[in-house]
Image: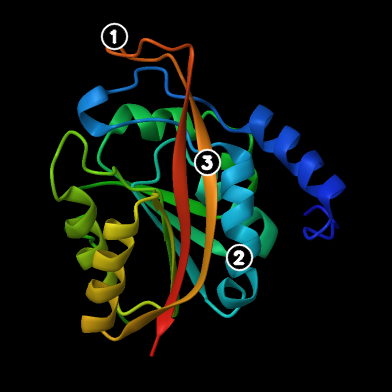
């Protein structure tokens, strides 16, 4: 465990460099699954937003965990048991290539996150950088519905920044007994990965959302 003050800009930079090295990128990224590795700086931003809330949880669960960036950062800094739910076995293999896999208490489960093989009886903190629905319309809403089905203590979500979309998420959360406690704008720089990419780097606007039970 690193003894750091994560509110410090300098320490955040150290952690960014650390996790950039320790967490693998996708070896076989799949466009249909909208796979992009979560940048460490974005994962740390989300952690900073919900660290106090997450610290009250017994288990951290990452829906659509990919190569593990979010889950590794949360479990490493909180010293909690973590579970990653990921549909793509190749992504899980990439996640397990990290040296952190052997030093942290984490399990990866190959499954459809829309049907989580968990019971809603634990004090879960659920985090997710889900597909935004550009390839599979409505997949983000289906995943959020599955997250809520576990009745988590709190939810930390990374999503595409759009005012209409934010209103939809607010309504959906409210209808299921959750409210947005914290909200922050960010961005993600995506490298030229897939054939349809025409720019070497594409900047995607993001919303970092922290929701709690009402």
On residue 13, the disc is: none
Front residue (pair 137, 129): 137
Relative to 166, say whether 189 is above or below: above
Q: Is residue 117 visible?
A: yes
- Please identify the quadrant where the N terminus is shown: bottom right
Q: Residue at x 45, y 42 (%)?
A: 205
Q: Earlier in the sequence, mark 1 or mark 2?
A: 2
**Disc 2, SS:** helix
Alpha-carbon neighbours of circle 1 within 10 Å: few (<14), some, or many (≥20)?
A: few
Q: Residue at x 61, y 65 (%)?
A: 49
**Disc 1, SS:** loop
Query: Left or right: where does residue 48 sit relative to residue 92?
Result: right
Residue with the mark numbered 2: 49
Mark whose residue sits in front, 3 or 1: 3
> x%, y% of residue 61?
42, 61
> x%, y% of residue 183?
51, 66
Relative to 4, say whether 168 is above or below: below
Give the distance between the C-alpha atoms of the residues marked 2 and 3, in whole angstroms.
Answer: 15 Å
- View extreme (left): residue: 137
Residue with the mark numbered 3: 187
> x%, y% of residue 105?
56, 55
**Disc 3, SS:** strand
């Amino acid at each position: 465990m690193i003894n750091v003050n994560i509110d410090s800009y300098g320490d955040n930079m150290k952690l960014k460099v650390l996790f950039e090295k320790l967490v693998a990128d996708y070896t076989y990224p799949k466009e249909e699954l909208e796979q992009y590795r979560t940048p460490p700086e974005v994962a740390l931003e989300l952690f900073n937003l919900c660290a106090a809330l997450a610290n009250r949880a017994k288990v951290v669960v990452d829906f659509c965990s990919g190569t593990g960036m979010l889950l590794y950062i949360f479990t490493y800094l909180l010293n909690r048991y973590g579970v990653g739910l990921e549909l793509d076995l190749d992504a899980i293999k990439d996640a397990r290539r990290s040296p952190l896999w052997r030093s942290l208490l984490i399990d990866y489960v190959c499954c459809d996150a829309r049907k989580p093989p968990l019971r809603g009886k634990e004090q879960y903190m659920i985090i997710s950088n889900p597909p935004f629905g550009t390839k599979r319309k409505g997949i983000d809403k289906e995943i959020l519905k599955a997250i809520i089905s576990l009745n988590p203590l709190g939810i930390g979500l990374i999503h595409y920044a759009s005012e209409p979309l934010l209103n939809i998420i607010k309504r959906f959360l409210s209808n299921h007994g959750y409210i947005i406690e914290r909200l922050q704008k960010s961005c993600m720089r995506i490298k030229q990965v897939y054939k349809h990419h025409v720019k070497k780097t594409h900047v995607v606007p993001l919303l970092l959302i922290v929701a709690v039970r009402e």
